[in-house]
Image (tube, rainbow, N blue to C red):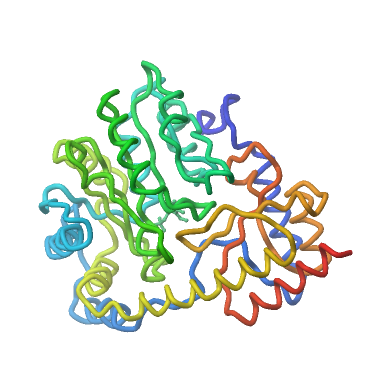
């Protein structure tokens, strides 16, 4: 695996060891409030669990086609149509073991050595690792607090050269929670067409959009479907992180290529998880709306508390993260996280774990019940006042 950690890396092993250091400190504290992870604190809605149990009881214990159960692909296809007016047929969809696997499948199927991949940044660093596995080069597209961490088309265009092959567009983004507005998405689509680039649209948080923010699925724009891979899944929307299930929709030839890779890697997604996913799409959506309302409540509570403390942040229009500028504390974000954890038991991660070169932001994920969130905000406030 020496390729993964070559010397051109932007995410260093030191960053990973800092994550471990924080987790190690946290493991020795009794009443830690973890606001670091991206895993919903809710359980998977019960009807989804029942559907998976039923599949097991009915002896659905065997391989499925590598692209996934036809009925699940059909439900995914309908979902694209209903939500984004996007027409994907079953041959243009592959069910995966989560968006994590989707990222690897896409990169392994598309990249050649020395290709360049533009990635929304700060970022979900799996993108860096998978691009490097292919001996290609990840190129961060920085986003800034002054733009609420939205992707800015001119910044993308400035990074394009002859080697650029893919733009990875993550909206809402992890770790910033930023929703790139539709007018920017339209301009990014124009750029992709102008330079003949493929777009990987990671829409894993697209069902978690708040207030007046709007999600535009780039593949739904004119002349974009043929150059877009849309990645989505069940982990975040349905609190199904442990089920390992997601999907990619894209042009048939790329899907065929990815199907070969997927067969070599894992043959198919877990069969009973696929039945659970089918129930998630076809069943009632009220549990999703309830979780979303609860996230929104926590989000607003945190924003108000951060305002009171005097910390700024980019407008968190989606996902369940607030990317918070802790410069006012007088500490670097890394030191802020370490000292805060040691003194108060609140666990947060610095933006440097997400490829941020400026050590002044932390990612706050509001994935704890509201009473814990209230308590964590009190602790942060008292820490800042020390
Ligand atoms: C932007 C982004 N993409 C992909 C993933 C992986 O999700 P999954 O659980 O579907 O593999 C995550 C998980 O945090 C994420 O934040």
Q: In which quarter of the image is residue 76?
A: bottom left
The picture places residue 24, in percent across and down from the top left corner, at 73, 59
Where in the figure is residue 317, as x and y percent of width and height? 47, 59
- Residue pictured at 51% horizontal, 43% vertical: 125
Q: Which residue lies furthest to the right in this view?
A: 386
Q: Is residue 135 above or below residue 256?
A: above
Q: Which residue is drawn at 18% across and 79% down?
A: 58
The answer to whether 283 appears left or right of 4 in the picture is left
State left or right for residue 346 relative to residue 95.
Answer: right
Which quadrant of the figure contains the C terminus? bottom right
- In the orientation shown, which residue stands out farthest toward the top? 162
Q: Residue at x 50, y 55 (%)?
A: 177
Q: Residue at 62% across / 54% down in the picture? A: 313
Classify residue 232 by image quadrant: bottom left
- For the residue pair 351 and 11, the one nearer the viewer reads as 351
> From the viewer's perspective, is 123 left or right of 18?
left
Residue 190 horizontal/vertical position (percent)? 28, 32
């Amino acid at each position: 695996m020496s390729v993964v950690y070559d010397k051109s890396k932007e995410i260093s092993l030191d960053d990973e060891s800092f994550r471990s250091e924080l987790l190690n400190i946290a493991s020795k504290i009794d009443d830690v409030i973890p606001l670091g992870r991206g895993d919903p604190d809710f359980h998977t809605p019960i009807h989804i669990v029942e559907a998976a149990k039923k599949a097991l009881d009915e002896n659905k214990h065997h391989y499925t086609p590598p692209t996934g159960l036809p009925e699940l692909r059909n439900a995914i296809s309908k979902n694209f149509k209903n939500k984004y007016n996007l027409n994907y047929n079953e041959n243009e969809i592959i069910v995966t073991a989560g968006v994590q696997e989707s990222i690897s499948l896409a990169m392994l199927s598309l990249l050649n050595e020395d290709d360049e991949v533009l990635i929304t940044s700060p970022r979900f660093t799996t993108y860096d690792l998978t691009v490097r596995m292919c001996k290609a080069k990840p190129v961060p597209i920085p986003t800034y607090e002054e733009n609420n961490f939205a992707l800015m088309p001119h910044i993308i265009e400035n990074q394009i050269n002859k080697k650029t092959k893919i733009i990875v567009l993550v909206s809402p983004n992890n770790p910033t929670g930023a929703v790139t507005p539709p007018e920017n998405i339209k301009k990014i689509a124009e750029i992709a067409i102008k330079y003949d680039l493929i777009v990987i649209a990671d829409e894993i948080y697209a069902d978690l959009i708040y207030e007046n923010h709007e999600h535009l699925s780039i593949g739904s724009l004119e002349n974009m479907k043929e150059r877009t891979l849309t990645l989505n899944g069940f982990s975040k929307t349905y609190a199904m992180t442990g089920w390992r299930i997601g999907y990619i929709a894209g042009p048939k030839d790329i899907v065929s290529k990815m199907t070969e890779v997927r067969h070599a890697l894992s043959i198919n997604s877990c069969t009973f998880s696929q039945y659970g996913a089918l129930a998630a799409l076809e069943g009632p959506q009220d549990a999703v709306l309830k979780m979303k309302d609860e996230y929104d409540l926590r989000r607003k509570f945190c924003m108000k508390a951060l305002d009171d403390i005097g910390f700024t942040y980019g407008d968190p229009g989606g996902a369940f993260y607030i990317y918070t500028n802790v410069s006012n504390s007088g500490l670097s974000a890394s030191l802020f996280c370490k000292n805060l954890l040691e003194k108060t038991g609140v666990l947060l991660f610095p933006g440097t774990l997400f490829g941020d070169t400026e050590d002044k932001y932390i990612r706050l994920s509001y994935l704890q019940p509201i009473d814990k969130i209230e308590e964590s905000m009190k602790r942060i406030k008292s820490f800042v006042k020390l």
